Amino acid sequence: MSSTTEPLPIDRRLRQETLFARERVYRFGQATPLERLTLPGDEPGPEIWVKREDLSAVKSYKWRGACNRMAVLTADERARGVVTASAGNHAQGVALAARQLGVKARIHMPRSTPRVKQNAVRHHGGVFVEIVLSGDSYDEAVTAARADEAANGAVYIHAYDDLLVMAGQGTLADEIVLSGHGPFDAAWLQIGGGGMVSGVSNWLKTYWPAIELVGVEGVGQASMKAGLAAGHPVALDQVDIFCDGTAVRKAGALPFEVCRDTLARVETVTNAEVSAAIRVLWEQLRCVSEPSGAMGLAAVLKNRAALAGKRVLIVITGANIDFLQLGLIAQSQGSAGGHARTIRVKIPERPGTMLGLLDGCFAGLNITDFQYGKTDADGAWPVFTLAADNASALAALPAKLTAGGYEWTDVGDAVDVAFRAIALRGDLLTAPLFLRLDFYERPGALHDFLDQLVRDRADIVYFNYRQSGERIGRALIGLDFTSADARAAFADALPEHGEGYRSCAPVDDATRARLLGRA
């Protein structure tokens, strides 16, 4: 007589493996801290606790799952070596384990992988790691790694769709439970393939059954949300890669099974909202998070009012960010202090109207970006990015513009604005003068310069300014005069230094010619 044993449900198997992972992962790394985050501003909000996985040896939580999986390799498997695909963080975890275990690892990474991540993999893996640049996307790197596995017999270490990897990631939740700072009302957990969210949510639900677990995905990479809606994992046609650490086309099958039961819902965040969260982490914790690492906070900030008074948990999943991307994030609308919006406003093309707009509707707002070039004899469409410390100041702007008789439109996603394609028709100008202006970044300084020196004396025909975060703002300004004599008189009387600005001088003839299209 024979009997069969039903396999344990995946949630029970994952809990069991997380207990085993406790003994394995700390051979390779140390526990990370849990810190309190105080939100800026006076608006009500939640009490936020942050799990600092960015402070691990590989600046990401990914070492946990990779090391836990590789710790159980048999002698035969170690001799065969391992192979994997990664955009960066998982690769570092595999490299760390490979070096400590003495196992050869081939890591397929997309050709677009930033050099900083490639160098980090080499640093952690040393002679035990070989990087193979394969394809232009993570999916293409996976295809190459799987072909490598089949051809060479190496053991494939999956980045997320593996029970032991999921359990390894769950050890960060174990540290949270043991910290003594719980229980929490809610946890907002970012999702890529689902390895971290499944391991963490499973463990948190075990000890705090009442906790609300919310998954967070980028608007352009919400594969888990799509899968939960369909009832099974589905592949997205396109994936936004701004948050590259979570840019996965299809959620893992095993993580999906867990998340279907543990997550209350999945919410999405925009790249601008993530950029704003990165700024908050820097200003409050001096933490430089990679975009995917800030997604949980981005969702909490988005729901700040609704979460007021609650105790909320988030995870900074990593800090492996390319230095050049920091500049893009710092210049984005989302990272502007407080609240911001970018608008295009129609005004009559005559002297004084631009200042009238600044004096009236924009009074009390901070201009962080100003783009304009004259392309029409009668009307102008300058673009402004405006910021305020509180949402109410910006919320009142549409009514002010309407009352002032202005036509306007939101252009936060406009391609010409993003690429600063500022057109200018030189044939519409009579006697142009272009100035390089360096002014002190304080409220009203730019307005004061224009008010004192330009008002009613010239027509503003070109403006290119973007706030850089320095104490000095830099702008390229074009003014048009009724005659060459009027231009000369203005230039002769213009002080090089003055109240509110450090320097102002005409540009050279070559620059002037290029701006006018006459080079």
Image (cartoon, rainbow, N blue to C red):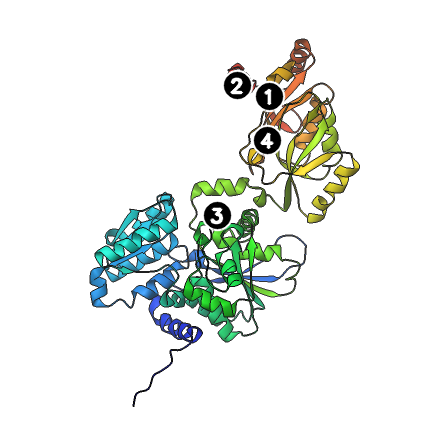
| Residue furthest top as drawn | 485
How far is the residue under mark 3 from the one under mark 4?
A: 28 Å
The residue carrying mark 4 is 465
Q: Nearer the viewer, mark 4 or mark 2?
A: 2
For disc 2, the neighbor class at 10 Å (few under 14, some 14 to 19, many from 20) is few
The secondary element bearing badge 2 is classed as helix
Question: What amino acid is at disc 4?
Answer: Tyr
Q: Secondary structure at mark 4?
A: strand
Which structural element holds mark 1?
A: strand
- Compared to residue 162, the image places residue 206 above or below, namely below
Residue ID for mark 2:
514
- Residue denoted by label 3: 240
Q: Nearer the viewer, mark 2 or mark 1?
A: 2
Residue 172 visible in the snapshot: no
Residue 400 in the image, given as x and y percentages of width and height? 76, 39
| Cβ atoms under marks 1 and 3 closer than 8 Å | no
Q: Is residue 384 visible?
A: yes
Amino acid type for the residue under numbered disc 2: Arg
